[in-house]
């Protein structure tokens, strides 16, 4: 469940035209703002460029469709989520504290932009092969993250080792579904923190 840095950016003046990368970032921020305003399904390219303060021509120079822009936004959000989780974990803390730090960071990111989290849950699955590819990219990024966080001398010393790929997929899929179900039911994601921490600690804890 993603979020991304989509703060309003200063619009380039005629004397200092925006670079292509800046236009792209503004369009992604515009897509995020449109989703917050009216949701992905009801938003239009016109909404995106209005929030981005640029033109339809510029939009289509960067993205072939609204869906392509949405997918790019979620890709950026996913990468940001991975970075924030990794940064939140103190690699020298006890293993159970590290688990808690990772889970709390994940939930905090999901809570920080609920409209985007809801759009990931409700809208992404209907986008066909693009959605499936993005979901696999998300899963692979998190598999790499979990392996990186658990493959340290400190954790090995206390009996914690990187879990198998199959176990990681079960863990990540379960946590994602728990967040999705909670959001769809109108619950507070923060309320699942303890059960998510306990389940993750049980699956990743020291082995004899």
Image: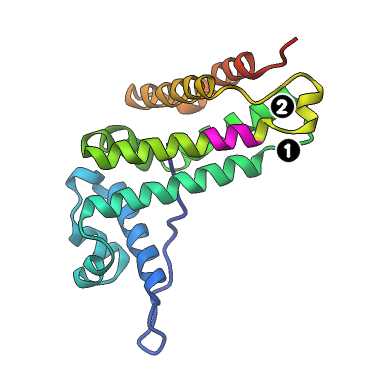
Q: Nearer the viewer, residue 41 or 207?
A: 207
Q: Which colour scheme is used?
A: rainbow
> Residue 156's image quarter?
top right
Residue beneath label 2, please? Answer: 97
Q: In this view, does 18 lie above or below 21?
A: below
Crowding at dot 2, Cα within 10 Å, few <14 / some 14-19 / many 20+, comes out as: some
Give the image location of residue 12, x and y in percent: 39, 79
Which residue is situated farthest in the top direction here?
208
Please, what is the dominant secondary structure of the magenta stretch?
helix
Label 1 element class: loop
> Relative to 113, is 163 on the left or the right?
right
| Image: magenta residue range | 143-148
> Residue 178's image quarter?
top left
Task: Quarter of the image for the C terminus: give it.
Answer: top right
Give the image location of residue 159, x and y in percent: 76, 18
Instruction: State the residue at coordinates (57%, 15%).
Output: 199
Instruction: State the residue at coordinates (35%, 70%).
Output: 23
Which residue is situated farthest in the bottom direction here?
15
Looking at the image, tell me whether mark 2 or mark 1 is earlier in sequence order. 1
Task: Quarter of the image for the N terminus: give it.
Answer: top left
Give the image location of residue 91, x and y in percent: 74, 37
Residue 186 part of the magenta segment: no
Q: In this view, does 16 lie above or below 199?
A: below
Give the image location of residue 150, x and y in percent: 67, 30
Q: Nearer the viewer, residue 188 or 6?
A: 6
Crowding at dot 1, Cα within 10 Å, few <14 / some 14-19 / many 20+, comes out as: some
Q: Which of 156 and 76 is in front in this view?
A: 156
Residue beneath label 1, please? Answer: 90
Instruction: State the residue at coordinates (25%, 71%).
Output: 58
Query: Does the CB distance between marks 2 and 1 fall below 8 Å?
Result: yes
């Amino acid at each position: 469940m993603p979020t991304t840095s989509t703060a309003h950016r200063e619009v380039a003046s005629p004397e200092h035209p925006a670079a292509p990368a800046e236009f792209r970032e503004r369009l992604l921020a515009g897509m995020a703002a449109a989703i917050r305003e009216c949701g992905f399904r009801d938003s239009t390219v016109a909404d995106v460029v209005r929030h981005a303060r640029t033109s339809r021509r510029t939009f289509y120079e960067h993205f072939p469709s609204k869906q392509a822009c949405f997918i790019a936004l979620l890709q950026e959000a996913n990468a940001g989520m991975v970075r924030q989780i990794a940064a939140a974990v103190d690699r020298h803390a006890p293993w159970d504290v590290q688990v808690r730090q990772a889970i709390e960071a994940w939930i905090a990111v999901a809570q920080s932009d609920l409209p985007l989290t809801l759009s990931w849950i409700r809208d992404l699955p209907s986008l066909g092969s693009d959605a499936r590819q993005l979901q696999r990219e998300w899963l692979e990024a998190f598999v790499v993250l979990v392996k990186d966080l658990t493959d340290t001398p400190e954790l090995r010393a206390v009996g914690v080792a990187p879990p198998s790929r199959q176990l990681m997929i079960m863990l990540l899929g379960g946590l994602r579904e728990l967040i999705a179900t909670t959001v769809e039911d109108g619950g507070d994601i923060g309320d699942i923190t303890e059960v998510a921490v306990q389940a993750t600690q049980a699956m990743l804890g020291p082995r004899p």
